[in-house]
Image (spheres, coloured by chain):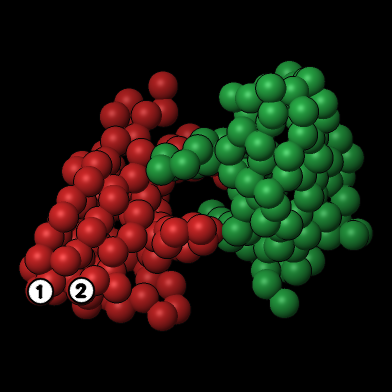
Amino acid sequence: QKEVEQNSGPLSVPEGAIASLNCTYSDRGSQSFFWYRQYSGKSPELIMFIYSNGDKEDGRFTAQLNKASQYVSLLIRDSQPSDSATYLCAVNRQGGSEKLVFGKGTKLTVNP
Amino acid sequence: GAVVSQHPSRVICKSGTSVKIECRSLDFQATTMFWYRQFPKQSLMLMATSNEGSKATYEQGVEKDKFLINHASLTLSTLTVTSAHPEDSSFYICSARPWAIENEQFFGPGTRLTVL
């Protein structure tokens, strides 16, 4: 089982819709969870992170964490064409290490 | 703030040559820097963790004699790909963690390496 799994997509949503991106992880001791956005040919940029179970909102983005299910998600409300990118889920390894383990990413396309 | 630069952004070299990539934190001090590699349509794979003034810690399967890492100061880390081969062609990305901020890494723009 891969450490961090994401549906590779592509996921297509119309402009203005909610995009839902999912991620599961295998290490039950993982402590910190991150969502990055990566445009083609560019390096990742941090969207948000979440440490505790529940929801965390930042503008149009909401991260949801369920440690019991080992599941983290990212919701993008009012999706815009500029949100079209690959979204990477990353998880801190057990023990609070700074090392991040990345999923393969989900490619999102927002259609005008 | 929290800007990380990489140089060069793109490099093409012949097989057998060595290539040095610099990673700089421009407006903060980074106690720890990370080097990643990303092949097309793949995720970022951590190659090594670099701490200022000490030897880098390499991930399993990464040859430390091939990928030389030097973290000479709190703002600069270098990755040297020695005797590069076509299979080393990839997107190399560094990230830096500010000493005052836990659990957050700032990524450089990446270096596209092509080995002919």
Q: Which residue is drawn at 38% across and 64% down?
A: B48
Q: Do the residues labelled 2 and 1 touch (CB within 8 Å)?
A: yes
Tell me if B82 is positioned left or right of B46 in this view: left
SS type, badge 2? loop
Disc marking residue A109: none
Q: Where is residue A29 in the image (x, y as percent from the top left)?
A: 75, 64
Mark 1 Cα within 10 Å, few/some/many (few <14, many 20+)? some
The residue identified by callout 1 is B16
SS type, badge 1? loop
Tell me if B90 is positioned left or right of A97 in this view: left
Q: Residue at x 81, y 40 (%)?
A: A20
Between B72 and B44, the one nearer to me in the picture? B44
Q: In the picture, one chain is red; tell me its letter.
A: B
Between A75 and A50, the one nearer to me in the picture? A75
Amino acid type, label 2: His
Of the two numbered discs 2 and 1 on the same chain, state the one appearing first in sequence: 1
Disc marking residue B85: 2
Q: Residue at x 32, y 26 (%)?
A: B27
* Looking at the image, residue B49 lies above or below residue B93: below
Q: In which quarter of the image is the C terminus of chain A?
A: top right
The chain ID associated with circle 2 is B
- Is residue A64 visible in the rendered image? The answer is yes
**Count of numbered labels shown in the rendering:** 2
The chain ID associated with circle 1 is B
* Looking at the image, residue B48 lies above or below residue A31: below
Q: Position of residue A10 (x, y in %)?
A: 68, 49
Mark 2 Cα within 10 Å, few/some/many (few <14, many 20+)? some
In the rendered image, residues at marks 2 and 1 fall on the same chain: yes
Rendered hue of chain A is: green
Q: Residue at x 62, y 52 (%)?
A: A105
